Image (cartoon, coloured by chain):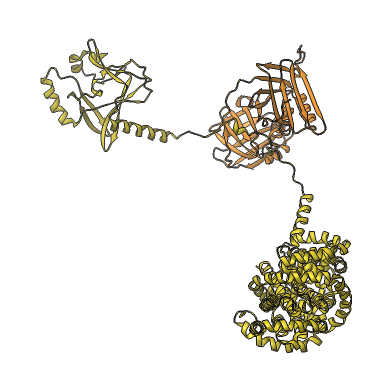
Chain colours: A orange, B yellow
Amino acid sequence: MFEARLGQATILKKILDAIKDLLNEATFDCSDSGIQLQAMDNSHVSLVSLTLRSDGFDKFRCDRNLSMGMNLGSMAKILKCANNEDNVTMKAQDNADTVTIMFESANQEKVSDYEMKLMNLDQEHLGIPETDFSCVVRMPAMEFARICRDLAQFSESVVICCTKEGVKFSASGDVGTANIKLAQTGSVDKEEEAVIIEMQEPVTLTFACRYLNAFTKATPLSTQVQLSMCADVPLVVEYAIKDLGHIRYYLAPKIEDNET
Amino acid sequence: MIMVRRRQRTAKESTSSSASGGGPSSASGIPVDQTLPMSVAGSLLEDQYFASPKRKDCRLMKVSENGQLPETTLMDHKGHHKDNKAGRTIGVPLATRSQTRTIENFFKANAAVKDSEKTIHTEDQLELVDEEQNQEDKHMNGQLNEEGEELELANEQLNEHLTAFADDEDAKAEQKLMEELQLQQVVEELLFDGSSRASSDSPCYQREMAAMQEIQVMPEILHIKEFPELNERLGSLADFQTHRSALRDSHSSTHSSSTDNIFLQEPVLTLDIDRTPTKASSIKINRSFELAGAVFSSPPSVLNACLNGRFNQIVSLNGQKEPLAGPSFDLDQHDSSSCDSGVACALTANTESPAGQARRRKPATPHRILCPSPIKTGLKVTGGICKVGSTDPLSPRKSPRKLPATTAAVAACKSRRRLNQPKPQAPYQPQPQLQKPPPQQQQQQDDIVVVLDDDDDEDEDDVHALLKAAEERENQNKAPATANCNKAGMKAMLKPAPVKSKTKSKGPAKGQPPLPLAATNGNREMTDFFPVRRSVRKTKTAVKEEWMRGLEQAVLEERCEGLQVRHFMGKGRGVVAERPFKRNEFVVEYVGDLISINEAAEREKRYALDENAGCYMYYFKHKTQQYCIDATVDTGKLGRLINHSRAGNLMTKVVLIKQRPHLVLLAKDDIEPGEELTYDYGDRSKESLLHHPWLAF
């Protein structure tokens, strides 16, 4: 028996919105510690890792480990049926081939049940080693989304160059070149607007804009985004989900072609 | 099934058309050898056609008969084919094609009316031809048992004629060329009749389909031969057009005569139009009519067959105009086949003089709309048809009707469905159909029929666009048509390819799939950095089994590694670990004599007498049976030297190997090197304690 209850459907909605563009289907691994999801996109260029801790749920029960393969498009459709303030409860039997998603209005006057068929997905699971990143940049998520969106107009790829002074995003294409520099904020008035750079050594990496823009679909989940970079290692874009966990995107760097 | 049959029929038709084209070519005298096989193939094709698209065959036969009657053999073959077809068509029910038949029936009804008019003149001729054909068919009947007896007779006659007439055909071809104009008119009438008949009789179509399948190989050859003829025809396209106009007039006159054949009762709707075009075309190409007739037979659906027959007639008209050019006849045949594959026809037709035909066809009744798909397919199938189409322009009205009809017949399988559908959709489809028909006409005129495309959808779309463009480009198309004719001669050159390309271009334009995120151009993959986890988890039982297997292996090996014997003050010898042992790891086996309790008691008494004898008797219980291992004898094994400790770091386990229990000492906990290995002897009896006070520790 698996049962997880969230106070606000909006969080689950945002999570689905954040991953359904990259993934068509994914397996939710439910255990006593929470729900985890790890899946690569079709091209195997990026990887999504979602962690929802059990203590972040209003109610969480998982008697046996359960893997629920879901079509994320279908899941998103179901979640569209929920009001943002509804309570969401996911339920599944131990060996069930369906999962039940129940929405309850705040005053319990309306209860809607949706049962979705599960899929048996044979997806590869990647072992992600712990990495000491050369650079870790924390910046406002909105700012990152804006940068990715703007630079995508110039080129398919973005060069991220991180130094002590700050982090520079640059793109060059047929139209011309674009450079956006962010300096580390000296005084941290508002934590969510701060740009914080922890750097062991400078790093310059090239990434595909399209994937970065797909990652920024998670912007509504968090005010801050953390970019972790290391030479010849995938970029990690992490959005924290308050009190619940985090969603991490891994993006393989582009093959060395142009470093500015 | 029906669809398949239709397709097969179409193929057969194509072959038959090619064969018929060969006949004309032979008549023209261009390739005698080719013409001979062509004529043979044509006869075979015709037989087949008789089965399914009798209309076309009938038309061809009629034409050939009319024109060839004086010339004997070739004419006879053709006439036989036509007769066979006609007879088959007459007897065959349209019911074979379930879906399309209804529409076809309707068309046929109209055609029948028209045919009735046409058949009047032709019936007499047809009867004569039928008699001759019946004789010929006798030979063919063996192969075409399925076909009607008449068909069989015609086939036999055809076979005989084919062999004997191969040479005759050449001479006949020349004669035919001379007589073509006259014969063409007659042929046109005959063709119309035959087409009408074929259309009316579904069984005939089926037979033709079967024949088409058989003849498929032959048509290709015929087509090849036909291609040069087509080129020649292309050159004369302008002439053909003029001829067409004349043919149209003639067709109008001939149609009445041709329609007289009740047998030909072709699709009612198309019959009128077809007749006129067919007549015009038939006037031009008598020889081509023969070939075309074979092709027409290919159209699976009766309606299509009727239409095809008309087209064939048209083609034949073209051929008549250019009787000398063997290719033109071939083209005509191709055209007839192309009728099924309307697209191919449209393409070729567009190139040559498709526009005029297309325009004419467009105005044609919505029924033609159904045909367009077949026409398209025909266009796709063979570029050679285009050449024929150039010749076709002679009879714009007839050609349009015929073209749609042929296209419908050619595409019969697919077209039938479409035709049925398009009719209801008439308001929307008429324009496309109209567009399509012109290409078909063109194609038919061109004799491009060689290959019939079954892809109605693409063909239709392409055909529509092609037709429109073709109309605009008619002049330009003529030149392309010639090129198409050349291509048709190549077979491989078939215009269908260009059509396909066009269709493809259209296809992508219609639906451009969004760029997938998956595109990894220049990007590395996650799997390059993170290893894929392969689960190494084993079930509890699997782990245990593995462990037990390890124990057995160790016992069998008498493993005793990492152990060292050392002397301990007060205890004597002991065993010390030289290497670390993991928990539950095998350390050593307690080796001794496995004896029963009774034996052990006796030995106990004996050992009691010897004060030097140590305590080496290990009693244990395994599966309700009490055993004892006596290691009193110093065998040099280390198991017996391990000392006692109530808090030992080893434990014993019984392992059954080959039905014999073994005592194995396992590490109770992780053991560090240098630790003495001990285990609990478990003897708590007072007597033992008395004698061995160390047991208490």
Residue visible at 59% across and 82% down? B142
* B365 sits to left or right of B44: right
**Where does the image place residue B152, in percent across and percent down from the top left?**
64, 83
- Residue drawn at x 76%, y 47% is B512
Image x and y of residue A27, in percent: 60, 36
Question: Which of the 4 image quarters holds residue B664?
Answer: top left
Residue B406 image position (x, y, % from top left): 77, 71
Residue A248: x percent and y percent?
A: 65, 28
Marker count (numbered): 0
Q: Is residue A107 visible?
A: no
Front residue of this view, candidates B432 and A15: B432
Residue under the image location 80 percent in, 28 percent down: A177
Query: In the image, B577: left or right of A136?
Result: left
Q: Is residue A76 above or below residue A224?
A: below
Quadrant housing the N terminus of chain B? bottom right
Q: Quadrant of residue A203?
A: top right
Q: Is residue A28 above or below residue B671?
A: below
Q: Quadrant of the C terminus of chain B?
A: top left
Residue A105 appears in the rendering: yes
B629 or B309, nearer to the observer: B309
